[in-house]
Image (tube, grey):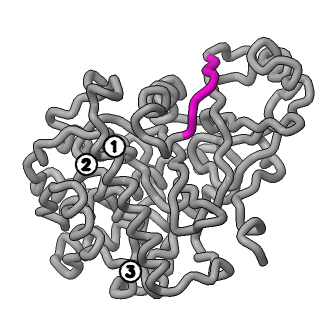
């Protein structure tokens, strides 16, 4: 198998997530020219939140992003905000897709959407593609490179990017804790886990702000990153900017480490992993923190808080997705499994609170 066979491909459109292609072609003709009438649409895998489609015409390709059907949380699916961030970053951060057109006319496909360039490459999902044939040392370097690209984002000059007035970095940690607690209460269902202890602990153990305001991605994980198919150690793209803002970079690191399962973790947590972060050669959370400190000059103290917050945030996101399924807003059976994930993430939070997981 060649690396070309591992490139992330779009496929069939999931039931209930179809696009009115006739209306879309009519609208895009002034934007794309004659290519619009030849458009074909496919859908990328994933997409528990904003949905991503591939538009193809002859030798041209674009990616279209739109909010999920049946969305309850409008602020989490703000296409105009995502488009603004990518527009600001295109000249100062080489990994973001280049935005090309934004539409807020809901008569086209029923919601806001935007187009961006298509970045072709490898996306690593739950299972590591051993077909790459990388050694343990190469895997280690590949995953360090993944975190280095996050460090580069945190080093973007806000003024140069035109994002110095974007977001509210002051009081960011407190707003995040309070905001995610509120989102939990808004999306809780009768059958879900009790997270009261975790919410109280996060409120009682908030560290001071790091003192640095940075562009933060807020959902930086392996399947939101594209690697070069010919040089799989190299990151060439970062996707899914829907939650990006300006805030504390340590909170962003915590969000990413919430996904980072390692070999020393309890079996119940390793079994729930969504990324192959426990593969032989992968750096541990402690090693990642050390690398991050070296690259950014920031000191990562109070790691248990940031890790617990990252896990709790994932618990809430999963609950929001499950809420849509529970109330019949979507029939996608994948969403039913997020209830179990909420229980697993809360169990891991409890171990951190008890001091049984410290790194």
Residues under labels 2 and 3: Cα distance? 22 Å
Q: Earlier in the sequence, mark 3 or mark 1?
A: 1
Identify whether 285 is placed above or below 206.
below
Q: Position of residue 192 (x, y in %)?
A: 44, 59
Q: Is residue 110 visible?
A: yes
Q: Are the residues tagged 2 and 1 within 8 Å (C-beta)?
A: yes
Where is mark 2, residue-wise? 249
Circle 2: is it few (<14), some (14-19), or many (20+) Cα within 10 Å? many
Which quarter shows the C terminus? Answer: bottom left
Q: Which residues are magenta?
A: 97-103
- For this view, does 197 lie left or right of residue 276? left
Q: Position of residue 94 (x, y in %)?
A: 47, 42
Disc assigned to residue 262: 3
Q: Earlier in the sequence, mark 2 or mark 3?
A: 2
Residues under labels 3 and 1: Cα distance? 24 Å
Disc assigned to residue 216: 1
Circle 3: is it few (<14), some (14-19), or many (20+) Cα within 10 Å? many
Q: Position of residue 158 (x, y in %)?
A: 28, 31
Instruction: Name the residue: 22% across, 54% down.
Output: 296
Q: Are the residues tagged 2 and 3 within 8 Å (C-beta)?
A: no
Residue 100 is inside the magenta segment:
yes
Instruction: Name the residue: 47% across, 70% down.
Output: 142
Instruction: Name the residue: 83% across, 27% down.
Output: 20
Residues under labels 2 and 1: Cα distance? 6 Å
Could you tell me which secondary element the residue under label 2 belongs to?
helix
Q: Are the residues tagged 3 and 1 within 8 Å (C-beta)?
A: no
Of tags 2 and 3, the one toward the viewer is 2
Q: Position of residue 138 (x, y in %)?
A: 48, 79
């Amino acid at each position: 198998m060649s690396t070309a066979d591992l490139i992330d491909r779009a496929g069939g459109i999931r039931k209930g997530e179809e696009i009115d292609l006739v209306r879309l072609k009519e609208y895009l003709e002034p934007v794309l020219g004659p290519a619009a009438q030849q458009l074909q649409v496919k859908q990328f895998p994933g997409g528990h939140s904003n949905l991503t489609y591939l538009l193809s015409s002859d030798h041209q390709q674009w990616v279209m992003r739109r909010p999920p059907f049946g969305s309850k949380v409008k602020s989490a699916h703000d296409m105009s905000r995502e488009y603004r961030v990518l527009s600001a970053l295109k000249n100062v951060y080489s990994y973001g897709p280049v935005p090309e057109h934004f539409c807020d006319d809901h008569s086209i496909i029923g919601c806001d959407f935007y187009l961006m360039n298509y970045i072709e490459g490898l996306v690593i999902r739950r299972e590591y593609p051993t077909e790459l044939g990388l050694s343990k040392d190469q895997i280690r370097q590949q995953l360090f490179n993944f975190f280095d690209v996050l460090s580069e984002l945190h080093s973007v000059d806000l003024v140069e990017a035109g994002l110095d007035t974007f977001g509210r970095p002051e009081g960011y940690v407190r707003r995040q804790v309070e905001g995610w607690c509120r989102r939990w209460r808004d999306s809780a269902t009768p059958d879900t886990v009790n997270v009261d202890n975790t919410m109280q602990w996060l409120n009682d153990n908030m560290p001071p702000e790091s003192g640095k305001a940075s562009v933060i991605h807020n959902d930086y994980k392996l399947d939101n990153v594209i690697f070069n198919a010919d040089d799989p150690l190299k990151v060439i793209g970062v996707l899914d900017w829907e939650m990006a803002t300006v805030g504390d970079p340590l909170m962003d690191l915590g969000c990413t480490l919430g996904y980072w399962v390692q070999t020393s973790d309890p079996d119940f947590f390793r079994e729930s992993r969504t990324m192959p972060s426990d593969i032989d050669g992968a750096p541990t959370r402690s090693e990642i923190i050390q690398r991050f400190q070296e690259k950014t000059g920031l000191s990562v103290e109070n790691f248990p808080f940031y890790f617990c917050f990252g896990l709790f945030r994932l618990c809430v996101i999963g609950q929001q997705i499950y809420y849509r399924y529970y109330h019949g807003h979507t029939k996608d059976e994948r969403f039913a499994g997020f209830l179990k994930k909420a229980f697993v993430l809360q169990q891991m939070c409890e171990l951190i609170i008890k001091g049984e997981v410290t790194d």
